[in-house]
Amino acid sequence: MKKSDSAEGPSASELIDNKLAELGDWRGKTLGRMRELIRETDPEVVEEWKWMGTPVWSHDGIICTGESYTSVVKLTFAKGASLNDPAGLFNASLDGNVRRAIDIHEGEAVDAAAFKALIRAAVALNESGGKARSRRVKPGGSQ
C-alpha cells in the first residue's frame, strides 16, 4: 500500500487507525474490516484523510470513502454508477448520476468477494481514465 504524501503530523493511515480506535464499537470493526478488504484487493491503494476527517481510498482517483454515522457505516464509491454490481451491494445513493454507496448496519455482513470485485472494477475504471457515466437506477431496482 502506498502512503499519501503528508507534510507534518500523522499520516492518513495513522489518522484512519485513530478513527477506528475512537469509534470503538461495531462501526469501527466494520469500517476496519472493509479497509482490510480494500487493502487486500489493491495493495497499491493510497489512504487519504479528507474533508475534515473522512477516510478515502484512492488509486489513480478516488475509489471510495468510508464514513461512520450513529446507525450506519457508509462506503461511497466515487464512480459507483459506472460500475456493474451483480451482487446488488449498492443500497444507497441510487438516484445519483455518479456515486453509489453501500450502507452497512449493525450485524450486517457484506459479501467479501462481491465487495472485492467492486474495488477491482473501480480501480480498473480509474486506471483507464474513464469518466463516470450515468446509470440511474429505475424504480424497482433495475438499471
Image (cartoon, rainbow, N blue to C red):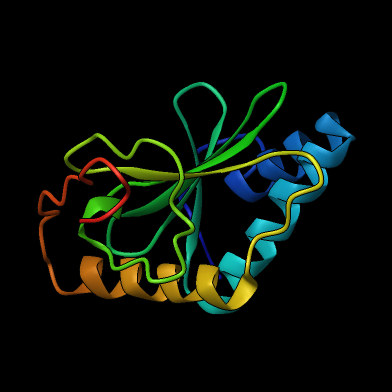
Residue 9 drawn above or below residue 81: above
Q: Where is residue 125 in the image (x, y as percent from the top left)?
A: 22, 69
Q: Toward the viewer: 132 or 90?
A: 90
Q: Is residue 94 left or right of residue 107?
A: left
Q: Position of residue 39 (x, y in %)?
A: 59, 69
Give the residue drawn at x 23%, y 65%.
126
Q: Is residue 21 left or right of residue 55?
A: right
Give the residue drawn at x 25%, y 40%.
139
Q: Position of residue 93 (x, y in %)?
A: 36, 35
Residue found at the far right of this picture: 24
Give the residue drawn at x 72%, y 58%.
109
Q: Toward the viewer: 71 or 137?
A: 137
**Image quarter in which the N terminus is found:** bottom right
Give the residue drawn at x 38%, y 71%.
86
Q: Can residue 43 be seen in this view?
A: no
Q: Is residue 50 left or right of residue 106?
A: left
Classify residue 21 by image quadrant. top right
Q: Position of residue 38 (x, y in %)?
A: 56, 66
Q: How many marks can you see? A: 0
Residue found at the far front of this picture: 140
Q: Toward the viewer: 33 or 107?
A: 107
Q: Toward the viewer: 130 or 92?
A: 92
